[in-house]
Image (spheres, coloured by chain):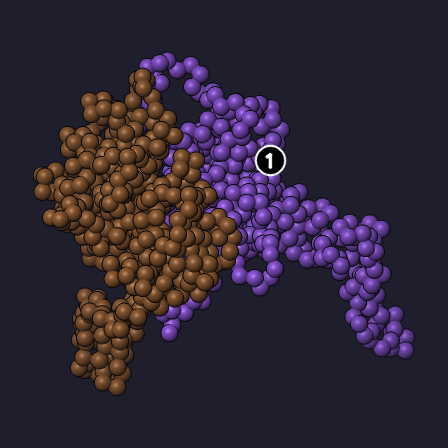
Chain colours: A purple, B brown
Amino acid sequence: MDKVDGTEHYNFKAPADLATLQVIILDTNPLAWATFEKSSSLSFPSALSQLLIFANAHLAFSQSNRCAVIANHIDGVHFLSPADPGTDHRDPGEADLTLEDLKEIAQKNASKYRVFRLLEDEVRASYRRLIANTTPEAVMASPNASYLAGALSAALTYINRICFGGMGGRSGGVPGEEKSNVNSAGGKVDETGRTMHAKILVVSVTPDPANQYIPVMNSIFAAQRLKVPIDVCKLRDSTVFLQQAADATGGVYMEPEHPQGLLQYLMVGFLPDHLARQSLILPTKVDVDFRAACFCHKKVLDIGFVCSVCLSIFCEPPEGAVCSTCQVKLDVASLENLGKPVVLPPKKKKKKKAIDSLPGSGVASAADSPARTE
Amino acid sequence: MGSQAMKSFEHLEGLSEAIFKRLYQQPATALAVFRRMLPNLAKTFVMAMLFNPDPVPVSSLEACVHPDQNRLKEEAFAKLRQLYIVIERQGTFALDATFKVELRKALTGGGAPGSFGLPCDTEDKNRVDIAFLDRYAAEQWESILHFMVGNETQSSRRPSEGVVRLLLHGKLMEQNRASGTVITQLGFSFLLQEVNSQVWTLLLLYLDMAEQLRMDPVDILHFLFLLGSLELGQDYDMKSLTPTQKGMLEDLRDYGIVYQRKSSSRRFYPTRLATGLTSEIRSLRSPAATLANATPGNDENGFLIIETNYRMYAYTNSPLQIAVLNLFARLISRFPNLVTARITRESIRQAISKGITAEQIIDYMTANAHPQLRKNTPILPPTVVDQIRLWQIEGERMKATSGYLFKEFAANMEFNAVCKYADDIGVLVWVDKNKGMLFVSKHEQIADYIRKRAQSNR
């Protein structure tokens, strides 16, 4: 009777059927790229072309696959594709082309698959607009600026809109009720209510923005909850946050040794989608640097103090003994005992007790200021 | 949905190596084959090898895959070999050179102009918009389906001779001396398919016939895959087409796949049926879709309501849809906008005897379910669905599987190892451990495995 068993109605279709949205977060800090080019001979235009081929490859997998590109710029986060509806769509590079040139471009366009062409044109035009609006002073003022937290938030909200219809991990309905295979608009959804899978690729040449530790961590947890893997391609400057991001969300972290072959790294490590990743073992970093940054000074530390209520991390006891996140009064008095042995050795009642107690007092004096071993 | 279209593509897998080599000479075709005919893991492998100039050792590809996903890996490799995309040489895989070059061109846009359609550079005096194209496609397609079902209303014309010849050739209809052309069993199951697969079925029949007409099948396939990559609403020039392809245009006009104002005009417009050729998105929702509902993803035009007491209510007055319902349900009464019917044992058994499967009926009902019904989970009442399947298997008392029997193994250990391997790659059908016999559906891989073991033991 197994063949007519009706329980297959209640099982949702395998996630294989859903398409994938690939969001690429690209560092566009011009100074960082210039520095990188000197050491690796990979220029930004070349990297952008290789990245666009990677995006085309992603779109080639299926007609319903989509791609979005976000620029992590020195003054904030900009969507390169899809472009903001309100922006001026004129391409600054095409302003002074003659009719002949335009015809030639139209001919060349005929040899490129329309979907690929639209993405590439939009990304390049948006980037040219972005650079046209950036002044050299702004670039010099902030050599290592990176709005990683903003980029991750923008990516996740975009994914929320496209893949979850704004519901994002919150599935309505009574728990235990059978989830429908089809949502009310007739589109296919799986049991978490998503219409598409999503993944984020971060291509970064700037170091960690330590002052954005908390927002970055929050974004990582949100991505974890939405089951969106964050892949990281770190071209320069090792990082702590992004390693943890890749590790926590099940993404791939790579620091390419030969950046000129960026395309091959992208194709092998970052292209496989949700379904393929279940079958493949992808090259990623295994020894993750799990250090955190303190909440007060944004320093990366190994050992620190943790609030017992909200678990926020400090490098030294906060002023006024009040946790800055949850405003709870912390008991700092017990900190004086830090470093002292719990059971004191019996004081020897001899003349030499002054000498014997020296080690004891030495320990006590070390506990006056909070022990900080780094 | 996707599985039905895949079946149409499976027909293409039987083509010869020479044809495949010529097929891969166009970037549009390479892209379409990549996109539609490969399983997911195979696509990943191809992309990993695409920009690698050297052949890749098989062992490094195998090392990337989880040990317990062997079946998927073997399936991927088998598909790649079958489509002549990879050449296996001394334990390394190399992508077929033409395929590699053309797929790279597709990704980087380096192909010849017109490889993805040459848009017209002059303005069309009689420009048509997308709504017109949708209407045209629906009209043409429906006239074919109406003709098949046998009711020609005055609004739909009889399809052209070429179409009728095609239907006869494909055994979807047959010549009956008494009553002209009537529909056959195959024709019935064709009617119940969804539009994308119907289009592909007709096109594959066309491909078959073309060889008789001495048209080059490779050219035809190139053109079909090119059509799949065109943009809706854009007019294209005929300059870049070969003579075979220009000849095809007229036939394609009859099916409603492209629109040309007249045979002599220099430009053509692809309709939604064309752009949906290589996509999984549904083009027209159902044969009688109205204009407003002909956009993909809009499922508002379902008309069927099924109740748990096997009654069916269809809010339609299209003769085509009513004729299709008549195939598997007993119609009771008809109102201006409603038809009531009942699904009974006799009606289902009649449908089964005509060659329609329970899956087709269920898919058809799901696809055309009323929006009110869609809010249920699951969409169709499970009692009805299960009962239709039960009625179908009432007729199937025995099931025959053809395959190969392996017996008289030398050692028990070898028998167990071969058993496990067969299980891993998913071809094992039956095994009797006491007698040392096993039955598999495909023997080549097992034979290879046994030979390799024998060699390594030696």
Image quarter where the C terminus of chain B lies is: bottom left
Name the one closer to the observer, B76 or A188: A188
Rendered location of residue B455, percent (x, y): 18, 72
Left or right of B237 in this view: A171: right
Location of mark 1 (residue): A145
Q: How many marks?
A: 1
Name the residue rendered at 46%, 62% in the picture.
Answer: B308
Q: Residues within 10 Å of mark 1 (few under 14, many from 20)?
A: many
Q: Is residue A264 above or below residue B456?
A: above
Residue at the location (66% across, 47% down)? A214
Q: Residue at x 16, y 47 (%)?
A: B179
Q: Is residue A214 visible?
A: yes
Q: Secondary structure at mark 1?
A: loop
Label 1 resides on the chain identified as A
Q: In x, y percent, where is residue A98?
A: 37, 13
Can I make out residue B108 in this image?
no
Q: Residue furthest bottom?
A: B434
Amino acid type, residue under disc 1 in the picture: Ala
Q: Nearer the viewer, residue B151 or B234?
A: B151
Instruction: Answer with the quarter of the image where residue A173 lies.
Output: bottom right
A328 displayed left or right of B132: right
Residue at image point 21% right, 45% down: B204
Q: Nearer the viewer, residue A65 or A215?
A: A65
| Residue A89: percent from left, percent from top | 49, 23
Most foreground residue, B381 or B404: B381
Q: Residue B128, located in which quarter of the rendered image? A: top left
